[in-house]
Amino acid sequence: MNLTKAVWILTLSIVLVACGSKVEKGSLEGRVVALAENKEQVFLISSIDLDAIISKSGAFEGALPEQYASTAKPYKEALYNSVNLEKSVFILLEGPVERDSPKRFTLLFEVKDPAAMKKEFKEVGLNLEGSDKLSTALNREAGLALVDNKIGMLVTNTDRNEMTAELLKEYVKVSEKKSENNELAEAIITKADITGVALLDRLYGAMNISDVSEGTVQKMKDMSKDSYIVGTINFSKGQVDMEIKNYWGENMKKYLPVYTSPVSSEAISSLGKGAPIFALAMNMDFKKMIDNIYINLEESEKNDVDQAFMMAGGKEKVSNMFTGEMAFAAYKGVTDSDPIFNGFIGLNDAEYLKNLVNGFGPMAGMTTGDDGVYTFGSDAKMKLDNKSMIFSTSVEEFDQLLSAGGNKIEAPQGVDFGKHPISMFVDFTKLDPKDFPSDTKMFINELSYFSVAGDDNGVKAVLKSKNAEKNILQQLIELGVESINAKVDYNYDDEYTMEEIQELEEEMDEDWENEF
């Protein structure tokens, strides 16, 4: 074989592999993707790395009280003996959603020891029978299939009369189809501690959205066809990293872009200086956002919106009034219960807004000075210029906001506030734990900050702990345990009768069951 021919064959092989399916037909991942593609009521696919979650939780290393850890330990051992936890466990939800409950729930996992798995399920009333190719078990609430002694599939249903052997076999058959959507397959098999993929058009169809017409729901479904959102959560020492990635179909792309540019330094510096408790900044195409909402409404709904807009001059006036750039910050006030709020809103049509403010403001107790500064009693001040509205609930600090060039907000270390079209943070270190209930106080004491940053393509969020040496999942579980215990903080001798103590203990047990 000459060199040219060898290179050609190698190149062709690479192209064929690249264009092939992202998952193997009949594998765990392949079956999950096949069900997602072919079961049109599936609106959410989630995967959980149970091995990572159990390990990071520290549940069996002291995070849970011994009495609960010892109770759960046999279940953990059974899980590790029967299921291959080197792979994630997948969950699919199907609509319609009624009373906050999906119609059907399907769980898929790779089996490690078929005999051990059959034994565990037999103890809960699901006795697998059949061949090595396919064995099944049914009861009124669920159907269980073991395929090729390798793949486990558990299907539950809210309509118990529908759970039949034929339905279960149909799911097995559909799961054997070849995956066609490589992009969706890649999203579904994204590896993280927890992954979720929401198919937007199916989500709109599955949810029972009150006060929204069928026509509007159908428009939302058409708009979001082939669009989906992938969310991941990863726990590590000292922090949780959360990310949402948006994958937009062709119909959705015509509504974009909306969030594309960072927030201006003028907006950020108009928030004052110092370290706020909370800050939010956004820069959007405001007119496009209004048009996007308006275009998908039914005529009757448009009329209702038109009536609301008429109070401010009509839809076009409102759409063109604001630039879409806005920023807000909350600082600790003189008293803990009275924080100071500062804000900036970008304007396109300041003169028209001034007319509105001058018309409606006096009814809210507003007065206007010669310099165009509006005062609301002794509590707040606001100024409108040609480009912005700047306001503060602190009369004393208002003048500082107007000298925007000298202000610099102090975000927590590691937070790039204002560097993205959407950004936000909460600084827990600026909160006084004494202002919160005892169970919430524990979390305030241990957490550092929560931040969000993103644009049209998605957002990233971080929850940071003060303790960088321990996995934050274990920290959160330990705090949850402490919070539950705090609810039963009583004195046997002085405060409660024995009957009341028993009731409190029963409530505590219910809390434990709901939490874990």
Image (tube, grey):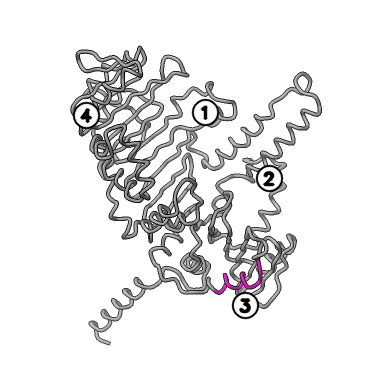
- For residue 486, side relative to residue 447 (left or right): right
Residue in front for this viewpoint, 447 or 3: 447
Whole-angstrom CA distance, mark 3 to mark 2, is: 37 Å
Whole-angstrom CA distance, mark 3 to mark 1, is: 55 Å
Residue that appears at 32% across and 74% down: 14
Mark 1, secondary structure of its residue: helix
- For residue 466, side relative to residue 263 (left or right): right
Answer few, some or many: residues within 10 Å of disc 3's Cα (few below 14, many 20 plus, some between 14 and 19): few
The answer to whether the residue labelled 4 contacts the one labelled 2, judged by CB atoms less than 8 Å apart, is: no
Q: Which of pointers 4 and 2 lies earlier in the amino acid sequence?
A: 2
Which of the numbered marks, if any, corresponds to residue 133? 3
The answer to whether the residue labelled 3 contacts the one labelled 4, judged by CB atoms less than 8 Å apart, is: no
The residues colored magenta run 163-173
Determine which residue is flagged by label 1: 445
Q: Which of pointers 2 and 1 lies earlier in the amino acid sequence?
A: 2
Residue 72 on image: x %, y %? 69, 49
Given the image, on which type of amino acid does mark 2 rest?
A: Ala
Q: Is residue 254 above or below residue 472?
A: below
Residue that appears at 28% across and 82% down: 6
Residue 469 on image: x %, y %? 50, 38
